[in-house]
């Protein structure tokens, strides 16, 4: 079974990591320090296919890598993980460029004529970056049905095979309706959905919302 | 029946205007010059309840006003129409801050920490601005079923009665699922959906797409 590196030990990393293990993948969770408490605990609770290490360990380990980092830390963490460790690998970027410094709801620190997805691809040009999953909470990410319906997910990326590989995992996460938007610059579209997600959440109190493209 | 002013003679203004006439409203289409060819033709084709005039004529005429202008012209047209003519009126802003100057797909000339909806409200502080309908093509605007399903529409505005009034018209346009996002600053959310609309349109070739919030 394929090896997957998950960078990030927060709720998103833990939820994605556990679900991937449950699906039979070997998963290494990466963090700044090998003995990160949350990562050690996660690995101990998720069986023999779950392990942990540094960001570089996890990036080396995976043939696929999930970026489950806070948007503001994503580019720094790519550096810590070693840009060379992403070469020729599929990298699912699910982070969002949220800027909480100006209060709630957050703004985006990059948008409109650029995106975090593009910045990630630019930082690791040898990798095949796929932007996806950033438009729902992490429980819905790993199980689309949690939204209460059959919503739409998007993939953006420059490499068709990488998008196909990630779409395969999305199907395992119960995303039946996946739209390939095109190259990585289309991540501008999905990252700019965060403001409507946030405001719909604030208006409805429902954090399990998802988007369906009616067509 | 209520009188409605429609500012703009393009496809959006014509489609909205014709549908409102068909629903029994009296509609005046406003343009820069009273003898605007498209407005004269539209009025002549839409029966006794359809008329045309200047932007100021149409703003004075309506107890509700629909801004069906190109986003880049919206604020100038409010000035031409006379800010005082919007006082205490419900103003549906369905324009989008699209900037085509940098090529396709367009960027937004305001977003993230401000919105065109807020700029409109700021320009006519005595009016009750409601941002809505800007996230679909004009045929879907006036008939949600054209999308092929039952999509979601949003309203943003500072005045509850104005949002209720516009929501009533949305129901007549077959929008059964309307979410009140809150004050006019939530227009940032809906205006920032344009990039994903555009890219989904480009990826699918379907201009009748709409968004459903699964919840």
Image (cartoon, coloured by chain):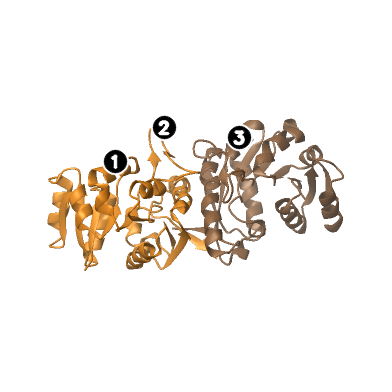
Chain colours: A orange, B brown
SS at circle 1: helix
- Front residue of A28 and A87: A87
Instruction: Report the mark closest to the observer, 1 or 3.
Output: 1
Say if labels 2 and 1 share a chain.
Answer: yes
Q: Position of residue B3 (x, y in %)?
A: 77, 46
Q: Is residue A181 left or right of residue A166?
A: right
The residue identified by callout 2 is: A102
Residue A110: image location, x then y, percent: 43, 41
Q: What's the CA distance linking mark 2 and mark 3?
A: 20 Å
Instruction: Decide which of tag 2 and tag 1 comes sooner along the chain.
Output: 1
Q: Label 2: few (<14), some or many (≥20) within 10 Å? A: few
Question: Which image quadrant for residue B79?
Answer: top right
Q: Secondary structure at mark 3?
A: helix
Above or below, comparing residue A26 to residue B101 in the picture = below
- The residue that label 1 is drawn on is A76
Q: Quadrant of the C terminus of chain B?
A: bottom left
Q: Which mark is residue B119?
A: 3
């Amino acid at each position: 079974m394929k090896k997957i590196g998950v960078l990030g030990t927060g709720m998103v990393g833990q939820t994605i990591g556990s679900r991937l293990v449950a699906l039979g993948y070997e998963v290494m969770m990466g963090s700044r320090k090998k003995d990160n408490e949350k990562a050690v605990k996660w690995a101990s609770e998720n069986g023999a296919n779950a392990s942990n290490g540094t960001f570089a360990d996890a990036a080396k380990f995976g043939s696929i890598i999930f970026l489950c980092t806070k948007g503001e830390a994503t580019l720094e963490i790519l550096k810590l993980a070693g840009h060379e460790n992403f070469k020729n690998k599929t990298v699912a970027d699910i982070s969002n460029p949220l800027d909480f410094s100006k209060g709630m709801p957050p703004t985006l620190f990059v948008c409109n004529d650029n995106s975090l997805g593009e910045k990630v691809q630019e930082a690791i040009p040898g990798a095949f970056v796929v932007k996806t999953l950033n438009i729902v909470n992490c429980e819905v990410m790993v199980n689309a049905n949690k939204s209460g319906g059959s919503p739409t997910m998007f993939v953006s990326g420059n490499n068709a095979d990488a998008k196909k590989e990630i779409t395969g995992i999305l199907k395992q996460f119960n995303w039946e309706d996946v739209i390939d938007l095109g190259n990585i610059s289309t991540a501008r579209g999905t990252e700019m959905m965060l403001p409507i997600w946030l405001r719909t959440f604030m208006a409805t109190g429902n954090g399990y919302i998802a988007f369906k493209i009616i067509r």
